[in-house]
Image (spheres, helix red, strand yellow):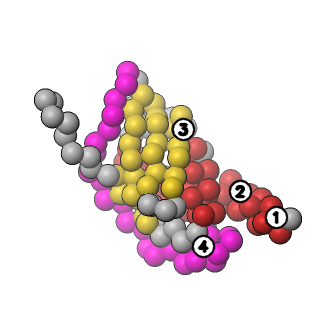
Amino acid sequence: MAFQIKLAAAAVTALAGAGTICPLCRGGVPPATAEVALITQELGDTATVKLHISGMTCGSCSLTARTALKRLPGVLDATVSAEDSVGTVRYDRRKVTPAQIAAHLTRLTGYGARIIEEPARRGE
């Protein structure tokens, strides 16, 4: 029961524009930086970008980050793993850019967001 209450509090905090502290673990988040190196997987008008998200200290931090990402118009889907600090975002390229996604995450949560540059595939 207590876990469900904490989880609900985390979701409410995330939807309200979470601050710089995780509501469950109270872990502090260092000042955000947003380094941008653009690499995406493009499929028509949608693309996928991976972000390294710094400052997450517990499992609820990933919920906070994922909820914040999904609030941005143009983001179609987002997953965030606290274990490896990686977020994968599928977005509409006509509505939002990877740099805007990273900045939005930083602005709403205080977590640092850096676009992960993936190595070029052979034959490209």
Magenta span: predominant SS is loop
Label 1 sits on what residue type? Ile
Residue, x 21% and y 45% (percent of image)?
119
Q: Which numbered tag is attached to residue 99? A: none
Question: Earlier along the polypeptide chain: callout 2 or callout 1?
Answer: 1
Q: Which numbered tag is attached to residue 5? A: 1
Q: Is residue 119 above or below residue 103?
A: above
Q: Nearer the viewer, residue 100 or 27?
A: 27
Q: Kindly tell me whether residue 32 is visible in this rendering.
A: yes
Cα separation between marks 1 and 4: 17 Å
25 sits to left or right of 45: right
Label 4 sits on what residue type? Ile
SS category of the residue bearing label 1: helix
Report the residue that reaches farthest toward the top: 44
- x, y percent for residue 93: 40, 31
The crowd level at tag 4 (other Cα within 10 Å; few <14, some 14-19, many 20+) is some
Cα separation between marks 2 and 1: 10 Å
Q: Which residue is labeled 2 in the image? A: 11
- x, y percent for residue 69: 54, 48
117 sits to left or right of 24: left
Label 2 sits on what residue type? Ala
